[in-house]
Amino acid sequence: MSATFSDSTSAPNEPIQPAVGDTFVAGAPLDFSGASLFFPENIAGSTLRADAPIGSPQSAAEAAALSDALCAKISPVSFGDRVFLFPSECDAWRSAVEMVRRYHGVVGRPKRRRFIVCVGPSDATASPPPGLEGDDEIIILRTDDHAAFQAEIDGRTAGILIAPVRTQAGFEVVSGSLLARLRETADEYGLILGFDETFCGLGRSGMLWAHEWTGVTPDLMIARHTPADAPPLAALVVTQRLARGALGGSTLADGAALLAGRALVDALSTPGFQERVQNRSWYLEDRLSALFYRRRAAFTALDGLGLMQALTLAGDAEPMRVKLAAQGLLTRAMGSVLGLFPPLSVEESDIDAAVSCIEMACAQECVSACNFDPLTWGIGVQN
């Protein structure tokens, strides 16, 4: 989950497009921006007719069957007992919130409607999850202090929402101890704990779901797939207990999105695939670690989890992002943090090329800072 829940094109959970004015070297750019998981979603062989609107009886029936089949694939590889699919993240969040409120109503706690969204202290501009911007019962908590969190809980509190990895105002892997404390608090007060894995889920962390690294299990989770060649697809995963508050019927997701989602889950379930992702993750971390120690003048920190790695600069990361885009490497600037989020299908040669681009940009910065001083570079110095 991103620390800021936003559907704007600049938010970390949204596909990243090159900024106006970015130029690239010849050939396709190397995309480490996290815009897509970059799977080859091939919808060939589908019985969905391309000319049939999704709302027509035939295509709606086929899409419903696809949706049921995809839900049946996701549930066994997650903590959830029930999975609901939606055409947008906004729809998924609205459904999740209403499901929790209805659940509390079913069990005799109808006044429980408030949600505490834990964004941490680093994000001063956080907003509610997409689709919930006008809901005045969504509370943004800009601290991880447990006492402050407990002070927000009252008889109207329904649930807690948090991201296992925060990527809006910077980059932060939320500690397992914090998630465990929230789990304990949720159990103590009868609250629902929800995780936003719209960015860090579906394999990016080196495991299928980022929260699996901590051993903490939520009651609900939202994940999202944004393929390059199909509409987006959002999944709401819940326990059977929480599903008691589910509404009857839902907006049917696009058929192409469902096919792309099925291709993604099939790939993630392929034996050896997650091991390959972990191996690429370790390779990326090793290469960036070596770069970090060579370029300590350029970077102040390196952090990451799986194929989500972040280099912290002394200043704003946007100028570096622009330089790298000009060299054909797409990255993500998050304040002073430069995010590198390659697709799951990344090759070691792609990682080598990306690190070389960053090395070149750092060298150019160094030359510019030295203003080509001959003494600095040892030019013309006599022994």
Image (cartoon, rainbow, N blue to C red):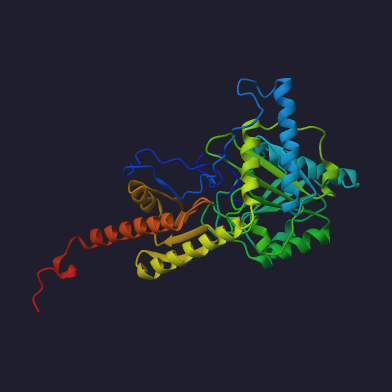
Left or right of 118 on screen, residue 356: left
- In percent of width and height, residue 366 lies at 27, 62
Instruction: Determine which quarter of the picture holds residue 271.
Output: bottom right
Q: Is residue 130 visible?
A: no
- Horizontal arrangement in the rendering, residue 260 relative to residue 74 (left or right): left
Q: What residue is rendered at 45% in x and 58% in y?
A: 348
Please say if 291 is above or below 317: below
Quadrant that contains the C terminus: bottom left
Q: Is residue 281 left or right of residue 330?
A: right
**Picture coordinates of residue 376, whole percent (x, y):** 19, 69
Which residue is the extreme one toward the front? 45
Q: Position of residue 62 (x, y in %)?
A: 72, 28
Comparing 299 with 335, the one in front is 299
Q: x, y (%) of residue 357?
A: 35, 55
Which residue ends up furthest to the right in the rendered image? 108
Q: Residue at x 42, y 66 (%)?
A: 300
Q: From where the camera sits, is residue 166 visible?
A: yes
Q: Is residue 301 above or below residue 196?
A: below
**Residue, far bottom:** 383
Total residue callouts: 0
Which residue is rendered at x = 69% and y = 49% of the image? Answer: 139
Compared with 89, 61 (above or below) is above
| Viewer-side residue, 285 vs 14 | 285
Q: Is residue 18 left or right of residue 39?
A: left
